[in-house]
Image (spheres, grey):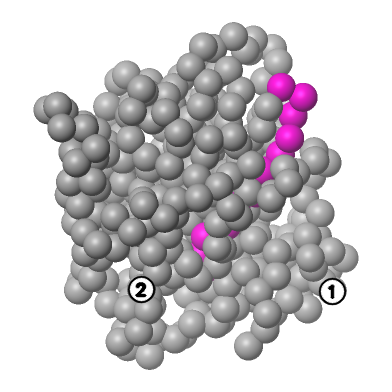
Amino acid sequence: MHTPRRVRELGITVGTLPTGPLNAITDVPGVRVGQTTLTGDGVNTGVTAIVPDGYAGMLPAAIAVGNGYGKLVGSTQVDELGVIETPILLTGTLSTFRVADAFLTWLLERDPAATSLNPIVGETNDGHLSDIRRRPITPAHVHAALNSATPALPAEGCAGAGTGTCALGFKAGIGTSSRLLHQGTVGVLVQANFSGVLTVLGRQVPAEPIDQDGNSCMIVVATDLPLDSRQLGRLARRAIFAMSRVGSDYAPGSGDYAIAFTTTRNPTYADRDLRTPFQAVTESVEEALLNSLTMAQTTTGHQNHTAHAVPHNRIQNLT
């Protein structure tokens, strides 16, 4: 079993823009991440929580849908109002609704006067490696992910909502990356679980397909740039475009979603200046997806199914 390493440690540099200090979504000031990981007895799943400071005051946000074959609780209100009013949680498909209910309990405990809240919960299908029908996530797991959120570098690969996910023929999971701009920071976190042929800086790394149907990708884009909801929607669409850079085939059964939000409430950014933020998003998503693979380890799970980690030497030999 190899030691998980981020792609930059393997000599792979994605793009030209500088990364943040952690090269993570948590480089965006005020953004924290917490995770709960469940393994053993045929279960490989978990919860990942992206918690921005000030969420209760509503932060500008937008959602882009590449293919809507998935479950994204709370999406229509974000589309309608252009804001998020809660953190964002990710998990396995059939646990989505248990996570949403436990999440709502956590939110109500923090706002005794609330009569309406819009928890946001996304998912990908980790049923190849996890007994998905058991729906093993409990309120304690959800609350632990939320309560443990920190501004540190999030665990990648087989962690949280990425514990049982696979992508591009290999074991994948959670990945993150960021880019620094003159005006602020763009950071992303991905839950990678989709089909295609792994492509690293334009060169393919073929593998035996794990699931031809796809099984989805969730992308969360965070920034402190002063963008409005419409502009954040443009960033979110570029996040989905960036999946093609690592070889996604956008299969019919793959639910591909991006959620973009800013921690700055007063939009002042001009559309003509979005070229560099677009570049920051595409570079960050590409690198985060690669990190989700190179930081993962070979995993055997439900019904003795195995997903193999991408051999690092196959990537290093491309450079």
Residue 137 in which image quadrant: bottom left
Tell which of 250 and 49 is nearer to you: 49
122 relative position to 268: left or right: left
Tell which of 59 and 241 is nearer to you: 59
Q: Position of residue 11 (x, y in %)?
A: 84, 64
Residue 223 in which image quadrant: top right
Is residue 245 at all visible to an observer of this figure? no
Mark 2 neighbour class, 10 Å CA radius: few under 14, some 14 to 19, many 20 or more: many
140 relative position to 68: left or right: left
Q: Position of residue 10 (x, y in %)?
A: 79, 68
Mark 2: which amino acid?
A: Leu
Q: Quadrant of the C terminus?
A: bottom right
Q: Quadrant of the N terminus?
A: bottom right
Mark 1: which amino acid?
A: Asn
Inter-mark Cα distance, 1 to 2: 34 Å
Element on which disc 1 rests: loop
Specify whether residue 159 is painted magenta: no
Provide the residue designation for mark 2: 38
Q: Position of residue 248 (x, y in %)?
A: 57, 55
Element on which disc 2 rests: strand
Provide the residue designation for mark 1: 317
In the image, which disc is placed on residue 247?
none
Specify whether residue 173 is painted magenta: yes
Is residue 301 at all visible to an observer of this figure? yes
Mark 1 or 2, which is nearer the eye? 2
- What is the tally of numbered marks visible in this picture? 2
- Magenta range: 172-183
- Residue reaching furthest to the left: 115
Residue in view at x 69 percent, y 50 percent:
22
